[in-house]
Image (cartoon, rainbow, N blue to C red):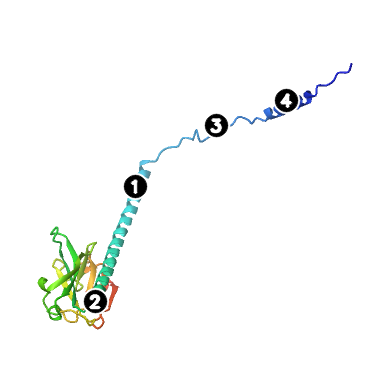
Amino acid sequence: MKAIPNAQCPHVSSFRVERSAFGVQSSSPTPKSSLLNPPFRGGFTLFELLAVITIIGLVLSLSLGSFHGWGDAQAVRGSAEIVEAALEHARDYAVTQRVPVSFEYLTGIDATNGIKKIAEYRIVQEASIAAATNSALSAEDNSQLLGSVHKLPGGVWLVPQVPLQNPAENASDRFVFLPNGKVCNPQTAGFLHLFVVSRKMRGTGNTPKIIYQIDLDPVNSAVTSSKRSSEEFSP
């Protein structure tokens, strides 16, 4: 009697072969990573630490000095733009409302603390052209304050001239905008400009380091501003 081979044997045999083939596909043991066992290295020496700290200190000092200088320049520039806009507002109000308007500014000791010197300005509607063009400052009972008194930030000063005669003294002046579009200065005839300056002086000549000059055209009250160099005012 002839034996009949089991039909499942080939499948079993092939299955075993595949398992056997699969099982022999084993990789060799992975060596331990060098990251887990880094080689020993020595630390920084005291000289190296001191050198790094010194370099960091120099970089910080230079950066802070540049930042403060940049901050002063931006404060003076921004204040000049504020003053220029306020002068244009006073001119437009005088022309549209057909009334004389004064732009008054003062640089003096802050009344709140009595120590720090600050600059402030205000816009005033005058009672009449005669009162506005008087050489004396307008009286409070004959004028009307438009808005509020504005203080300039950043230690910026408003002065009528450069170099400063005496930085410790108060500086004040005013411009009067007339309904016909013209502007005048009752205190000093023909004196139609002011300076927006930093309180930090250059050298010993009472000349500020940063200077912006604002000019007024006596005919049409046009306002223009320009940055000036401190060397232009040096003796």
Query: Which residue, given by chain and number where applicable, does mark 4 sit on?
Result: 16
State the residue lying farthest toward the front: 97
Residue 107 lies in quadrant? bottom left
In the image: residue 17, left or right of residue 31: right
Q: Mark 1 or mark 2, which has the lower sequence index?
A: 1
- Callout 2: helix, strand or loop? helix
**Element on which disc 3 rests:** loop
Q: Nearer the viewer, residue 143 or 102?
A: 143
For the image shown, how many numbered marks are present on the structure?
A: 4
**How many angstroms separate mark 3 from mark 2 (CA)?**
84 Å
> Residue tagged by mark 1?
53
Badge 4 or badge 3: first in the primary sequence = 4
Residue 86 appears in the rendering: yes
Task: Point out the frontmost of discs 1 and 2.
Answer: 2
Left or right: residue 186 compared with residue 213: left
Q: Is 100 placed above or below 198 here?
A: below
Instruction: Estimate the x, y position of residue 165 in percent, counting from the top left.
Output: 15, 71
Of badges 2 and 4, nearer the viewer stands 2
CB within 8 Å, label 2 to label 4: no
Q: Which residue is mark 3?
A: 32
Please tell me which residue is depicted at 25% across the width and 79% down the height of the picture: 221
Q: Is residue 230 visible from the viewing direction of this image?
A: no
Q: Nearer the viewer, mark 1 or mark 4?
A: 4
Position of the N terminus by quadrant: top right
Mark 1 neighbour density, 10 Å: few (under 14) some (14–19) many (20 or more): few
In front: label 3 or label 2: 2
